Image (cartoon, grey):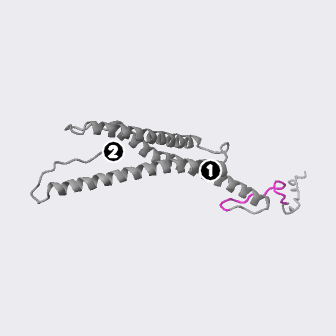
Amino acid sequence: MRVLSITLEENVAGRTAEDKRQEVSGLNQTHIQNEAARDNFIGLAHTALFAASVAFVGDVVPLKEAVFKSALLLSWLSSLVGLVALTFSFDSARRDTDARRQAIHEDNAPESVLTNRLNAIALWTFPIALIMLFFFLLANVENSMSGDEKRNNAQQLSKGITPPNRVPVITDQQYGITPPPRAPQVPASPPPTEKK
């Protein structure tokens, strides 16, 4: 967590040092609230996304029949990495706060590089997981729809109905359709022969 600091001197606009202190305090409080909300969102979003993907695979598409499984696995891995990074960021933030307390009278406060990186990983793994899950869902919904369409077309053909966008093909026995009787064919007479 970053805490804002500014030089508390009066400026030409007439703001006093106390005004600046109050503004910095308000900005710091807003920053703390934003970071807490982000941490809550990341934990909830990763968990909800993982639960939704597990439910989808279990209820809609059995894993054995699913296509593009690598996207699902990448989504799960991304959520796992994000949650682990978020968990470690809490401990890292606590250590950063302790280090800042110890260095309160120093001019240069210690940087919280590890905490910032962990927070970035936790934050950005969520859209990665979301995008991978979207690709997995899209591929499987498309695959399931095309399978349903194939079954529907086969059912229509078995009833003698031509599915949309398909040229009708009539076969003798395949779909139980009896072709109309054919006209008898008269053999062609042989060409006349010349008599001598």
- The residue wearing badge 2 is 1
Number of other residues with Cα within 10 Å of mark 1, as a class: few under 14, some 14 to 19, many 20 or more = few
Is 16 inside the magenta-drawn segment? no
Q: Is residue 178 left or right of 91 when viewed as pictured?
A: right
**Callout 2, which amino acid?**
Met
Which x, y percent locates residue 23?
23, 56
Is 174 inside the magenta-drawn segment? yes
Indicate which label's residue lies in the foreground, 2 or 1: 2
Mark 2: which secondary structure? loop
The answer to which image quadrant residue 108 occupies is top left
Q: Is residue 143 left or right of 93 when viewed as pictured?
A: right
Mark 1: which secondary structure? helix
Asked whether disc 2 touches disc 1, contact meaning CB atoms under 8 Å apart, the reply is no
Circle on res. 168: none
**Callout 1, which amino acid?**
Ala
Q: Which residues are magenta?
A: 164-177
The answer to which image quadrant residue 113 occupies is top left
**Residue at position x 41%, y 41% from top?**
90
- The residue wearing badge 1 is 55
Seen in the picture, residue 99 relative to 29 is either above or below; the reply is: above
Give 162 or 172, whichever is nearer the viewer: 162
